Amino acid sequence: MNKKKKVSIGAVIDEPGSTIKNKTGGWRSFRPEINQEKCIKCGKCWASCPDNAIRKNKKGEFEFNYDYCKGCGICANECPVKAIIMKKEEK
């Protein structure tokens, strides 16, 4: 007897814009912090962020939206001048 088991597909976004409704930064263990004096404003952190959690402010500085940052550290890894460090999240 071959019984077919129905398996649901994971990680499906079923409506556009649903990630905006779901703030995902709450389970972060480490948070990125940027030294604006060291930053050369190359934008590599912004371009590499998988969560679109980095924005440029009116002064032209990059900053993090911690509501959506998961703390993966890709931004810190990609920063050519090491202006971004990962710090243990304090809750």
Image (tube, rainbow, N blue to C red):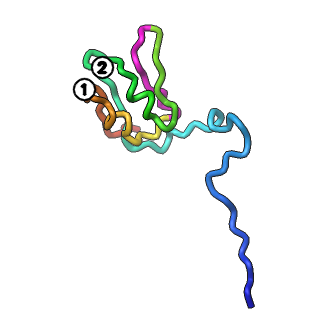
The residue at which mark 1 appears reads as 81
- Is residue 86 found left or right of 62 in the rendered image? left
How packed mark 1 is, by other alpha carbons closer than 10 Å (few <14, some 14-19, many 20 or more), is few
Q: How many labels does the image show?
A: 2
User: Which image quadrant is residue 47 in?
Assistant: top left
Image coordinates for residue 16, horizontal then vertical, percent = 71, 37
Q: Which residue is drawn at 38% across and 39% down?
A: 74
Q: Which residue is drawn at 26% across and 15% down?
A: 37
Q: N-terminal of the two: label 2 or label 1?
A: 2
Q: Is the magenta stretch mostly helix, strand or loop?
A: loop
Q: Which residue is drawn at 74% across and 83% down?
A: 3
Name the foreground residue: 69 vs 40.
Answer: 40
Q: Which residue lies furthest to the bottom in this view?
A: 1
At numbered mark 1, what does the secondary structure look like: helix, strand or loop? loop
Q: Are marks 2 and 1 in contact (CB under 8 Å)?
A: yes
Q: Does the magenta stretch include residue 56?
A: no
Q: In which quarter of the image is the C terminus?
A: top left
User: Which image quadrant is residue 24 in?
Assistant: top right
Image coordinates for residue 53, horizontal then vertical, percent = 49, 30
Q: What residue type is labelled 2?
A: Cys
Image coordinates for residue 87, horizontal then vertical, percent = 31, 36
Q: Which amino acid does label 1 sit on?
A: Val
Q: Does the magenta stretch include residue 62?
A: yes
Q: In this view, does 73 lie above or below 2?
A: above
At numbered mark 2, what does the secondary structure look like: helix, strand or loop? loop
How packed mark 2 is, by other alpha carbons closer than 10 Å (few <14, some 14-19, many 20 or more), is some
**What is the magenta range?**
59-68
The residue at which mark 2 appears reads as 39
